[in-house]
Image (tube, helix red, strand yellow):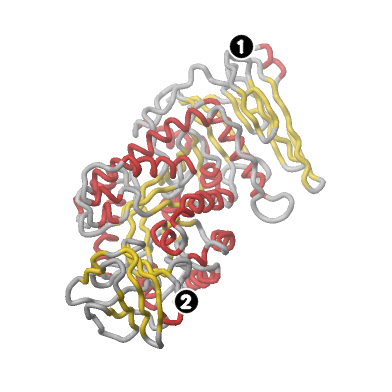
């Protein structure tokens, strides 16, 4: 059992074992905290902060004890002394909070490699629909689902990444060596593959480019300046040369192709994903929110519970960033094409902006492309790549992604281990700093001046601040995933153990920073369910007898609580 005393819905260990409770409610409050608690070994002082919204009063009550600690925390703008449980023990080991997305390809598409990737730290398996066919991707989906069925203590989500409207050069009989200053042509005629001219797969290519534009091959590996054009040929001068091979990716600097974001092939792949109940769709080259609404409408018509992650990688997406992310379930910073369509020096600031926008809307964000590119061919990364991973973690990314490194690289397992180690080390330093930094202000969630969402956000903030001060992990029970997502938004220093009785919710929570989703059937008895949860964590080595945990009872859908009551409790694990 776990001993605790509740003070205003925020509970501290109860040294007396005697009843003492204060409950919070909207527009009302009940207090029965016994005065004789003050005379015990632990003096408890309540500090109440009243927030008025639309004529109603919500009282947020925090409590503290006089202990030998100089740690101060800010709770919703009010500075107060927060108790530090001196005898509290940290969770065994350090749990990496930033998630890792691995692209599965020829180097990793076997049962053995899927298992090893999961053991090394993979949280999400990405299917790149630009390569392979439905048969090969079906094999990967089946293997991941087999792993999830066998390894109950871990879960791997599945992300299907659409190809999108890519503009590519045509087939060549043999590679063509482009030299600086030479003339070279692109044509919309089909099947042209001479030494000085190659076809493109996009009929409006001639209309989209103008004299003076710069065409980039494979994101900038080669570049050509447009000098002239006819109705079917674009004449260029090579700026940066190289070996041009078949089906190379083409971008025009500062422009997006006037193609639909979801092509006919993409729709077939999306139907394939719906049939296989993947967890996420990563949608390529999203320019505005309309395509997100269109896809969501289709998913509703299919009764498909799949979240949409737009890839921010086109010049047109940046002016529409707020609307795109607002309509979506997250975002991916796809830096390859983003750095091709926009000046490459803008990418770092755009990455930071996209992460901040997602964080402000409580949406998960993935940083992708070239994170460990050198490890495709080499067993160790460059120091710049290590710093790149660390910066993404520090900026607040929920997940970081490997592409070619795990799809066709020579060292896929080493790449995952490097990413795991760098992220873990960065987080271990950040977690120490977090204990001394003020909490993030509560964001308004939902409509109106005051809402159920705002109440939940307030409690997520207070739970995070308390857990940070006490050095405790957080346990939360959820049916929708709303409260673990809120808690993840405030970035607690320790792990969020999110127990859910919904498999789809468990799969989805895998992407969120700091959340360890666990499946468990709930009983009608809250204490019995809590005891089973703590036993599970103790058996898994996450908790030990005598540890303290912060227990959150809140969220959009009530579990074992009155609709008007939210609780944050600190529990001591006794058995």
Task: Answer yes or no: is residue 508 visible.
Answer: yes
Q: Is residue 313 above or below residue 547?
A: below
Q: Residue at x 32, y 67 (%)?
A: 129
Q: Residue at x 21, y 71 (%)?
A: 176
Q: Is residue 110 above or below residue 541?
A: below
Which of the pair 527/328 is nearer the observer? 328
Q: Can you give x and y, in whole percent of width and height, for residue 534 in the image?
A: 43, 33
- Alpha-carbon distance for marks 1 and 2? 72 Å
Give left or right: position of 35 versus 470.
Answer: right
Outermost residue toward the left in this view: 174
Q: Can you give x and y, in whole percent of width and height, for residue 495 in the image?
A: 45, 36
Give left or right: position of 450 versus 124.
Answer: right
Task: Specify the quadrant that holds the C terminus.
Answer: top left
Task: Answer yes or no: is residue 259 visible.
Answer: no
For mark 2, give the secondary structure: loop
> Mark 1 = which residue?
41
Q: Can you give x and y, in whole percent of width and height, for residue 295 in the image?
A: 48, 70
Q: Residues within 10 Å of mark 1 (few under 14, many from 20)?
A: few
Which of the pair 466/498 is nearer the observer? 466
Disc assigned to residue 258: 2
Quarter location, residue 204: bottom left
Who comes first in sequence, dot 1 or dot 2? Answer: 1
Disc assigned to residue 186: none
Quarter location, residue 459: top right
Give left or right: position of 369 versus 49.
Answer: left
Q: Residue at x 41, y 35 (%)?
A: 426
For mark 1, give the secondary structure: loop
Q: Residue at x 65, y 15 (%)?
A: 43
């Amino acid at each position: 059992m776990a001993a605790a005393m509740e003070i205003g819905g925020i509970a501290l260990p109860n040294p007396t074992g005697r009843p003492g409770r204060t409950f919070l409610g909207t527009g009302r409050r009940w207090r029965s905290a016994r005065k004789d608690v003050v005379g015990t070994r632990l003096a408890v002082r309540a500090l109440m902060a009243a927030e008025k919204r639309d004529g109603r009063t919500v009282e947020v009550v925090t409590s503290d004890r006089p202990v030998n600690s100089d740690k101060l925390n800010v709770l919703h703008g009010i500075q107060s002394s927060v108790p530090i449980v001196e005898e509290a023990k940290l969770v065994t080991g350090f749990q990496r909070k930033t998630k890792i997305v691995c692209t599965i390809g020829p180097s990793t598409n076997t049962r053995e490699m899927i298992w090893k990737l999961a053991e090394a730290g993979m949280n999400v398996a990405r299917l790149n629909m630009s390569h392979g066919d439905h048969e090969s991707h079906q094999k990967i989906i089946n293997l991941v689902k087999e792993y999830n069925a066998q390894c109950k203590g871990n879960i791997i989500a599945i992300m299907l990444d659409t190809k999108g409207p890519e503009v590519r050069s045509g087939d060549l009989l043999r590679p063509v060596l482009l030299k600086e200053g030479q003339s070279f042509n692109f044509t919309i005629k089909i099947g042209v593959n001479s030494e000085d001219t190659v076809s493109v797969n996009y009929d409006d290519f001639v209309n989209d480019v103008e004299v003076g534009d710069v065409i980039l091959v494979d994101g900038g590996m080669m570049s050509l300046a447009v000098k002239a054009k006819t109705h079917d040929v674009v004449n260029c001068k090579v700026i940066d040369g190289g070996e041009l091979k078949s089906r190379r990716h083409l971008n025009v600097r500062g422009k997006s192709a006037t193609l639909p974001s979801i092509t006919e092939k993409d729709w077939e792949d999306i139907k394939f994903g719906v049939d296989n109940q993947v967890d996420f769709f990563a949608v390529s080259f999203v320019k505005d929110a309309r395509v997100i609404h269109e896809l969501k409408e289709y998913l509703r018509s299919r009764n498909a519970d799949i979240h949409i992650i737009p890839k921010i990688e086109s010049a047109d997406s940046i002016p529409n960033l707020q609307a795109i992310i607002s309509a979506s379930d997250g975002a991916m910073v796809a830096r390859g094409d983003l750095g091709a369509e926009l000046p490459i020096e803008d990418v770092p600031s755009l990455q930071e902006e996209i992460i901040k926008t997602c964080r402000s809307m409580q949406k998960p964000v993935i940083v992708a492309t070239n994170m460990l590119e050198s490890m495709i061919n080499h067993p160790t990364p460059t120091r710049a790549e290590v710093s790149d991973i660390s910066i993404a973690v520090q900026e607040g990314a929920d997940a970081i992604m490997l592409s070619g490194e795990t799809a066709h690289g020579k060292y896929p397992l080493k790449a995952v281990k490097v990413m795991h180690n760098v992220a873990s080390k960065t987080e271990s330093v950040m977690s120490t700093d977090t204990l001394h930094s003020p909490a993030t202000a509560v964001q308004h969630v939902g409509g109106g001046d005051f809402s159920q969402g705002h109440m939940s956000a307030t409690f997520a903030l207070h739970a995070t601040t308390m857990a940070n001060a006490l050095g405790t992990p957080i346990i939360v029970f959820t049916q929708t995933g709303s409260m673990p997502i809120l808690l993840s938004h405030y970035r607690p220093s320790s792990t969020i153990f999110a127990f859910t009785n919904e498999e789809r919710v468990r799969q989805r929570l895998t992407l969120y920073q700091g959340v360890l989703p666990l499946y468990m059937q709930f009983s009608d008895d809250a204490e019995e369910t809590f005891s089973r949860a703590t036993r599970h964590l103790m058996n898994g080595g996450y908790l030990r007898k005598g540890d303290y945990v912060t227990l959150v009872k809140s969220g959009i859908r009530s579990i074992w609580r009155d609709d008007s009551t939210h609780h944050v409790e600190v529990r001591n694990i006794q058995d």
